[in-house]
Image: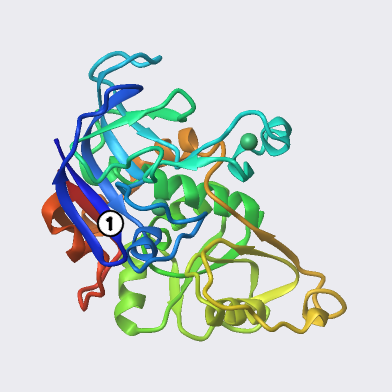
């Protein structure tokens, strides 16, 4: 079958590889491209060590076509990114997403979804996806699950005024997750008029490049930008909550008095999407997939999806 094989930074290309011989075999319908995939392309790994060669792609949507598992042939499924070891202290605590021995879908041990088929080992967390969803909605299961977890970690409560920074694949869907938790308003913190208009189309109540000081109960960064976190730390009210969900490329210098003496802020980081998939999949019906999916790429044009682009980008997907 055809699969993308990553051999070195910047060297990702389609090759002929063996079909998966073990595990739950899933025929790929579509796979989302994540900021993490662009990091891999540049030679960095958001979750661990790079181990070449490998087949990337962790935002899987497909149908069961073989192997053993709880799902009948033909079931439309997605899977969680992390495959925990099941035996370490984190796993025994029930925090499998923090398992230090976990392997990841789209790595050397578990070839990913930028391929015609994927073989999911028994440790994979597989979830059914309703047939009624369009491809462009159903392929958003993994980013929506991340959005649900990010909103849970941030502690969004009913009636909250929420501000979110980062209008990429995650920012495009997190507004639904915040609303589902009862947020009274969700404001996008953006850097351009174009993004402000897009945010309103995506369902945000408002968009601003300069949020008022102390105007929000809960702020959430899904941009991975340290500058955006600094803006949000001014925008949250005393006693408010701060969610940090991203991969950051430099440290933040912070006056801790803002968290303690001056603000009594609760700050929570988030990683992956433990226990969030069922809730996320139920939210996909309300998402405008045609707006969120900004480009589709055939497998052999994978580098178009992974390299810098002038076009406006939310979620791009790969079709085998
Ligand atoms: Zn992702
Ligand atoms: Zn473990």
Q: Quick one: SS at disc 1?
A: strand
Residue 101, quarter of picture: top right
- Residue drawn at the location 44% of the way across and 72% of the way down: 206
Residue 287 in the image: state x and y as whole percent.
33, 49
Decide if residue 158 is in sight here.
no
- Residue drawn at the location 50% of the way across and 70% of the way down: 224
- Residue drawn at the location 37% of the way across and 42% of the way down: 141
Decide if residue 202 is in sight here.
yes
- Residue drawn at the location 53% of the way across and 71% of the way down: 248
* Placement of 28 over or under 140, stated as above or below: above
Residue 218 in the image: state x and y as whole percent.
64, 65
Q: Is the CB–ligand 1 distance for label 1 below 8 Å?
A: no
Residue at the limit of the structure toward the right, as seen here: 261
Residue 242, quarter of picture: bottom right
Residue 28 as seen in the image, left or right of residue 174: left
| Quarter of the image that includes the C terminus | top left
Colour style of the rendered protein structure = rainbow
- Mark count: 1
Residue 84 as seen in the image, left or right of residue 12: right
* Placement of 171 over or under 310, stated as above or below: above
Residue 204 as seen in the image, left or right of residue 112: right
Name the residue nearer the viewer: 220 or 85.
85
Residue 203 in the image: state x and y as whole percent.
38, 60
Residue 133 in the image: state x and y as whole percent.
26, 36
* Placement of 204 over or under 252, stated as above or below: above
* Placement of 45 over or under 188, stated as above or below: above
In this figure, which residue is indicated by the disc labeled 1?
7
Name the residue nearer the viewer: 232 or 115.
115
Dot 1: few (<14), some (14–19), or many (≥20) neighbours within 10 Å? some
| Quarter of the image that includes the N terminus | top left
């Amino acid at each position: 079958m055809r699969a993308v094989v990553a051999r070195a930074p910047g060297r990702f290309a389609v090759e002929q590889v063996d079909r998966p011989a073990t595990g739950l075999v899933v025929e790929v319908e579509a796979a989302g491209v994540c900021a993490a995939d662009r990091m891999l392309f540049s030679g960095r790994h958001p979750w661990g060590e790079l181990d070449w060669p490998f087949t990337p792609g962790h935002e899987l949507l497909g149908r069961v076509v073989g192997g053993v598992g709880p799902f009948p042939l033909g079931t439309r499924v997605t899977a969680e990114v992390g495959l925990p070891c099941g035996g370490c202290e984190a796993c025994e605590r029930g925090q499998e997403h923090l398992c230090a021995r976990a392997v990841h879908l789209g790595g050397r041990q578990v070839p990913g979804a930028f391929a015609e088929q994927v073989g999911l080992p028994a440790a994979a967390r597989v979830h059914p996806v309703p047939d009624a969803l369009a491809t462009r909605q159903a392929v958003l299961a993994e980013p929506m699950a991340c959005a649900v977890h990010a909103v849970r970690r941030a502690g969004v409560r009913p009636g909250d005024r929420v501000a979110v920074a980062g209008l990429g694949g995650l920012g495009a869907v997190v507004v639904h997750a915040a609303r589902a938790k009862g947020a009274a308003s969700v404001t996008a913190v953006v850097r351009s008029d174009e993004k402000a208009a897009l945010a309103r189309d995506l369902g945000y109540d408002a968009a601003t490049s300069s949020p008022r000081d102390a105007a929000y109960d809960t702020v959430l960064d899904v941009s991975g930008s340290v500058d955006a976190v600094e803006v949000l730390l001014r925008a949250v009210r005393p006693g408010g909550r701060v969610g940090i969900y991203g991969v950051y490329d430099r440290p933040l210098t912070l006056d801790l008095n803002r968290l303690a003496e001056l603000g009594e802020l609760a700050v929570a980081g988030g990683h992956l999407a433990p226990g969030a998939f069922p809730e996320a999949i139920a939210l996909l019906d309300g998402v405008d997939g045609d707006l969120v999916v900004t480009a589709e790429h055939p497998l052999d044009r994978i580098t178009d999806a992974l390299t810098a682009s002038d076009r406006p980008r939310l979620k791009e997907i790969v079709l085998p």
